[in-house]
Image: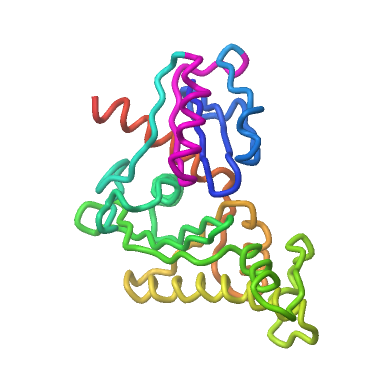
Amino acid sequence: MLLTLDIGNTRTKWAVFSLAGKVTEQGIFLNADLANADFSPSRLGYQRVVISNVAGTALASLMTKKLATYALPVTFIKSTSQACNVSNHYLPSASLGTDRWAALIAAWQLKKAPCIVVNAGTAVTIDALTVDTSNNEGLFLGGLILPGLDLMKTSLGEATAQLPKINPANASANSVTFFATNTAEAIQAGAHNAVLGAITRMSTALQEKCGATPTIVISGGNAPVIAEQLQLTSELGVSVVENLVLQGLYQLDYFMENELS
């Protein structure tokens, strides 16, 4: 049994996987609430831990200290040039965020075809994954990073004198309008169209490069609303995948335990 942890900019997601890759327990909490998280192996039944952390060294140290009381193996993954039949063209390869790397690994295992891998959280990452025709394996070409929907909406209200502060929870499919008739609606439409535009442009670029229409694989807190809007405004195939990063961590753990041993 394996405990996987995805420590993001704002929240930490976790799941326990069985040997067969089935999730037996899962949860999510704000990073500020780490001290109250209960990862007792006697309760969850795991024997080792694999972590993706993009929240900095301080939080990594806190997590390490918390898990040390259980005296079980703990691995913080690093992005590499190749793993799980996926090659990483980021330069240098270790500079790629480990959440993006794990998501790419999971997306390849799910699709084994060209796809745009989107993580929609505090930041939005939009990554291009295609097929290396020389070996029929996955090839990560590169990607984009932009502020997440909530960050775009709230930052305008905080950084300007007259624009209103927007409640991100009020977003809906109508946020894709181009003809907003009030300022709050215009801010929401701007944020949503920025993300949708980046995804569709990346899809067009990847299709031109690989000659096949890619699938959009999207995960993260804002995945449902972005997927709904993509389906309303484009003909792209869209798959919402829960806990894509955690699934990638499970795949990477299997790779490290077996292929590298």
- Residue located 31% across and 48% down the image: 86
Q: Residue furthest left?
A: 134
Q: Is residue 47 magenta?
A: yes
Q: Which residues are magenta?
A: 43-70
Task: Using residue 167 as the reference point, say whether residue 89 is left or right of it.
Answer: left
Name the foreground residue: 122 vs 83: 122
Q: Nearer the viewer, residue 9 or 113?
A: 9
Q: Residue drawn 51% across and 31% down?
A: 62
159 part of magenta stretch: no
| Residue plotted at (49% across, 20% down) | 1
Percent x, y of residue 39: 58, 22
Nearer to us in this view, 22 or 64: 64
Q: Tell me the residue at 32%/62% (across/down).
A: 141
Q: Position of residue 78 (x, y in %)?
A: 33, 41
Q: Quadrant of the C terminus?
A: top left
**What is the total number of numbered labels drawn onto the structure image?**
0
Residue 8 in the image: state x and y as whole percent: 53, 46
Position of residue 88 relative to residue 74, above or below, is below
Identify the coloring.
Answer: rainbow
Residue 29 in the image: x percent, y percent? 65, 38
Could you say which is closer to the camera, residue 235 or residue 219?
219
